[in-house]
Image (cartoon, helix red, strand yellow):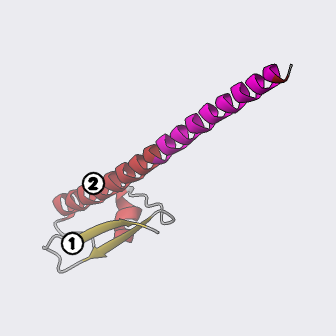
Amino acid sequence: MRKKINVSVIKILFFLAILAVAVLFLWKAVQKMEMGQQAESLKQLDSSIRKATMTCYATEGVYPPTIQYLQDNYGIQIDEGKFTVFYEVFGDNMMPDITVMERQ
């Protein structure tokens, strides 16, 4: 009788260990996926700002004076809780320095 109980306990512990390992792998996979999505979002925002800047220059003849101008007139949307955008203008006819970074 005691042998049956020990075997059952060992089987249950083995199953729980396998389940714990599976949960750990799933958790790591979800973390990697979230990091990939965040990186893709950053890349898309940077690309969108640069395209809107070039569109503004092509249609108006000058680069946009501020990032707010792009938001108001060219549909750029920035999730300020996730990203910080540095937009530095050197002159009307010079491409602004655009840097998009993740907030920590």
Residue type at the position of mark 2: Ser
Residue topped by disc 1: 96
Q: Main secondary structure of the magenta part?
A: helix
Kindly indicate whether the residue at mark 1 contacts the one at mark 2 (C-beta within 8 angstroms): no
Q: Which residue is located at x 43 percent, y 61 percent?
A: 78
Residue extent of the magenta highlight: 3-31
Q: Which residue is located at x 21 percent, y 72 percent?
A: 96
Residue topped by disc 2: 47
Q: Which residue is located at x 45 percent, y 68 percent?
A: 103
- Foreground mark, 2 or 1, reads 2
Query: Is residue 94 shown to the viewer in this render?
Result: yes
**CA–CA distance in space, label 2 to label 1:** 14 Å
In the image, taking residue 59 as reference, residue 49 lies left or right, namely: right
Residue 80 sits above or below residue 33 on the image: below
Q: Could you tell me which secondary element the residue under label 1 belongs to?
A: loop
Q: Which residue is located at x 43 percent, y 46 percent?
A: 32
Where residue 13 sits, quadrant-wise, is top right
In the image, taking residue 94 as reference, residue 48 lies left or right, namely: right
